[in-house]
Image: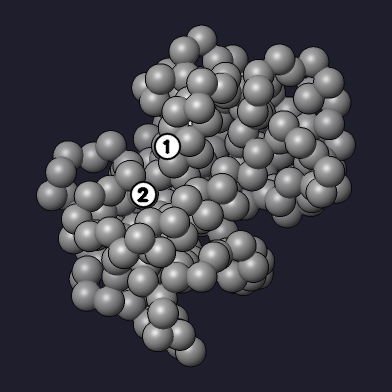
């Protein structure tokens, strides 16, 4: 499916967002993530997921700082190549918010950050925010971003999981449950945009689900598209 193609859209859709994965993934994983977005989006919002690409420059997982840098550079190139026609904005499919703080005017449409939307929602209510991440590299980047958004001295717990565990919801749930027992923050962000939070978890936050709900409020208010979150 090419960028800008939205089959079977309802007339009331206000925000049409392009999500691009931060790593190169399989066709099956794209389908899984698309199904997840389709299930989570509120009225007025539609998200289309595309693969980062399969070139040698596209990382297959985020294991090192170099992988994170390469991921962001690939995302910059992908989003800069998108014709903005038909899109309301871009939503990087990554809780690390790559390209979100790029210079104004770099892209044809506003960029919305899953982590930024989620973090500022809680901080605006005077709550403390922490996170969990599958490895130390992602945890360090989450700590940096949380501090950038005003999260203070939040320390992200490391789950010690592999990239393959992203699609293993049961394994991810077991790992997060163990760490949540010692967490002290009011809200703990699940540090992957593509993993569901198990029903019954009260402090573990699905950042994608919450970000989409907040974007749904924006759509309902019919705010102009020129300002990103």
Q: Is residue 181 left or right of 98 when viewed as pictured?
A: right
Task: Pinpoint residue 152: horizontal percent, then vertical percent.
Answer: 47, 13
Q: Secondary structure at mark 1?
A: helix
Q: Nearer the viewer, residue 98 or 13?
A: 13
The residue under the point 64% across, 44% down is 206
The residue under the point 59% across, 70% down is 38
Could you say which quadrant of the image residue 124 lies in?
top left
Image quarter of the N terminus = bottom left
Is the residue marked by circle 1 packed among few (<14), some (14-19), or many (20+) residues within 10 Å? many
Instruction: Say which mark, if any, is on residue 112.
Output: 2
Is residue 136 among what the camera can see?
no
Q: Does the CB distance between marks 2 and 1 fall below 8 Å? A: yes
The residue under the point 48% across, 89% down is 8
Q: Is residue 45 above or below residue 146?
A: below
Q: Which residue sits furthest left?
A: 105
Task: Pinpoint residue 143: horizontal percent, then vertical percent.
Answer: 50, 20
Is residue 91 among what the camera can see?
yes
Is the residue marked by circle 2 packed among few (<14), some (14-19), or many (20+) residues within 10 Å? many
Task: Pinpoint residue 109: horizontal percent, then vertical percent.
Answer: 23, 59
Q: Secondary structure at mark 2?
A: loop
Image quarter of the C terminus = top left
Task: Pinpoint residue 20: horizontal percent, then vertical percent.
Answer: 43, 59
Q: Nearer the viewer, residue 31 or 213?
A: 213
Q: Nearer the viewer, residue 97 or 151?
A: 151
Distance, label 2 to label 1, CA atoms, is 8 Å
The residue under the point 65% across, 19% down is 185
Q: Which residue is mark 1?
A: 116
Q: Is residue 150 above or below residue 177?
A: above
């Amino acid at each position: 499916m090419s960028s800008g193609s939205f089959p079977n859209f309802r007339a009331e859709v206000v925000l049409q967002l392009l999500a691009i994965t931060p790593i190169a993934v399989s066709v099956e994983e794209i389908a899984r993530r698309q199904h997840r977005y389709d299930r989570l989006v509120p009225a007025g919002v539609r998200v289309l997921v595309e693969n980062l690409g399969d070139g040698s420059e596209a990382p297959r997982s985020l294991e090192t700082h170099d992988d994170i840098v390469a991921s962001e550079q690939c995302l910059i190139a992908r989003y800069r190549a998108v014709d903005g026609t038909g899109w309301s904005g871009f939503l990087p499919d990554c809780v690390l918010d790559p390209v979100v703080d790029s210079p104004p005017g770099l892209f044809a449409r506003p960029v919305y950050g899953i982590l930024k939307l989620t973090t500022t929602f809680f901080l605006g209510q005077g709550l403390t925010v922490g996170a969990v991440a599958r490895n130390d590299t992602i945890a360090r980047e989450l700590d940096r971003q949380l501090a950038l958004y005003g999260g203070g001295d939040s320390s992200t717990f490391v789950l010690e999981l592999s990239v393959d565990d992203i699609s293993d919801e049961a394994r991810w749930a077991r790992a997060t449950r163990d760490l949540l027992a010692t967490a002290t923050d009011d809200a703990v962000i699940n540090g992957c945009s593509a993993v569901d939070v198990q029903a019954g978890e009260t402090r573990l936050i699905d950042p994608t689900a919450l970000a989409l709900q907040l974007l749904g409020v924006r759509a309902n208010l019919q705010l102009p598209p020129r300002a990103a979150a």
